[in-house]
């Protein structure tokens, strides 16, 4: 098996299920694989000639709903490559992508003996994801108000319903502060109008200083006169791969759980 993977998120999954050594070509933005693995462009600008040189058995993309690049798809058909086009927007999409890799990759010859181990590891990862996303206790989630989850701060851009991180928030018992599309660019007036109960800023690799002073990490949003900022209901989610809907979402979910538990106000004392 020789895999060219034009998706950092899917490479994250392949590494997690034990097939990182079968990746012979990677996306321009992939950062986990050894430097010896060549970069062959990305989904928008794939270097088809470089892919041809690598003689893959499998080509994997994380394409938009508009579909994959026609030239790459047609060459894959001509050469007999396994062509796997994964759409990963929602949390369920991420789960399905992991299952599809196990089912559709071209295990053959000496790789066939690895299939059972790969299937077992994929099942373990799905179980870990379910455990990481188990709902918070009712008395905790009931103390959470609507939360705005930003993936960019200038201009403010948010995970909306239909995005994997909004799904994770809901699974844990939180509520998204916005309706509408999965990824939304907002203006400052819209943020003020939404008036979220809390804000979580997703900043992969953020420093400890950003975590300790989250309002400073919000850029222009942090300078708004929002009640949640005055009350200290602002947090930074700093996992390095929080913006990749791959296997690392398990650890992202654990970090998100910790943040929600910290944001939830302590229950009011009922007295002696």
Image (tube, rainbow, N blue to C red):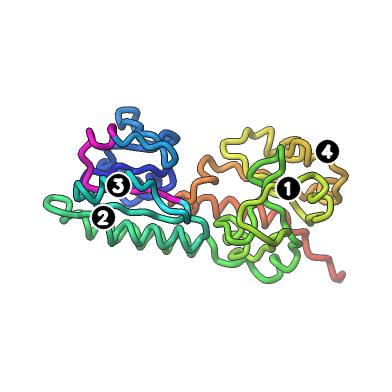
Q: CA distance from mark 1 to mark 2?
A: 40 Å
Q: Position of residue 101 (x, y in %)?
A: 32, 56
**Does residue 37 sit above or below 171 in this rendering?**
above
State the residue position of label 1: 186
Is 78 on the left or on the right of 130, as rendered? left
Which of the labelled discs sits on residue 231, or is there none? none
Residue drawn at 75 percent across, 65 percent down: 143
State the residue position of label 4: 223
Asked if labels 3 and 4 touch by Cβ distance under 8 angstroms, the answer is no
**Does residue 134 sit above or below 216 in this rendering?**
below
Mark earlier in primary sequence (4, 3): 3
Residue drawn at 79 percent across, 56 percent down: 197
Can residue 62 be found in the magenta stretch? Answer: yes
Closer to viewer: mark 1 or mark 2: 1
Q: CA distance from mark 3 to mark 1?
A: 36 Å
Closer to viewer: mark 2 or mark 4: 2
Which SS class for mark 1? loop
Is 41 on the left or on the right of 195, as rendered? left
Q: Position of residue 55 (x, y in %)?
A: 20, 39
Circle 1 residues within 10 Å: few <14, some 14–19, many ≥20 = some
State the residue position of label 3: 59
Circle 3 residues within 10 Å: few <14, some 14–19, many ≥20 = many
């Amino acid at each position: 098996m020789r895999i060219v993977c034009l998706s950092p998120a899917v490479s994250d999954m392949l590494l997690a299920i034990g097939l990182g050594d079968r990746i012979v070509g990677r996306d321009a933005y992939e950062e986990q694989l050894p430097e010896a693995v060549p970069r062959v462009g990305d989904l928008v600008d794939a270097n088809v000639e470089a892919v041809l040189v690598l003689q893959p058995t499998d080509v994997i993309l994380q394409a938009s709903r508009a579909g994959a690049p026609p030239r790459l798809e047609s060459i894959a058909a001509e050469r007999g490559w396994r062509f796997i086009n994964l759409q990963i927007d929602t949390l369920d999409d991420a789960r399905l992508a992991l299952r599809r890799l196990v089912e559709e990759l071209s295990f053959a010859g000496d790789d066939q003996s690895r299939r059972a181990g790969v299937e077992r590891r994929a099942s373990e990862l799905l179980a870990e994801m379910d455990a990481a996303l188990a709902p918070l206790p009712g008395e905790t989630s009931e103390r959470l108000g609507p939360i705005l989850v930003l993936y960019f701060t200038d201009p403010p851009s948010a995970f909306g319903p239909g995005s994997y991180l909004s799904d994770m928030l809901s699974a844990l018992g939180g509520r998204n502060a916005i309706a509408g599309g999965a990824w939304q660019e907002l203006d400052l007036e819209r943020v003020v109008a939404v008036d979220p109960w809390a804000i979580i800023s997703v900043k992969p690799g953020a420093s400890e200083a950003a975590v300790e002073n989250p309002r400073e990490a919000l850029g222009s949003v942090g300078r708004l006169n929002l009640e949640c900022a005055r009350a200290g209901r602002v947090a930074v989610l700093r996992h390095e791969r929080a913006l990749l809907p791959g296997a690392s979402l398990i650890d992202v979910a654990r970090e998100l759980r910790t943040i929600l538990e910290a944001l939830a106000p302590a229950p009011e004392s009922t007295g002696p």
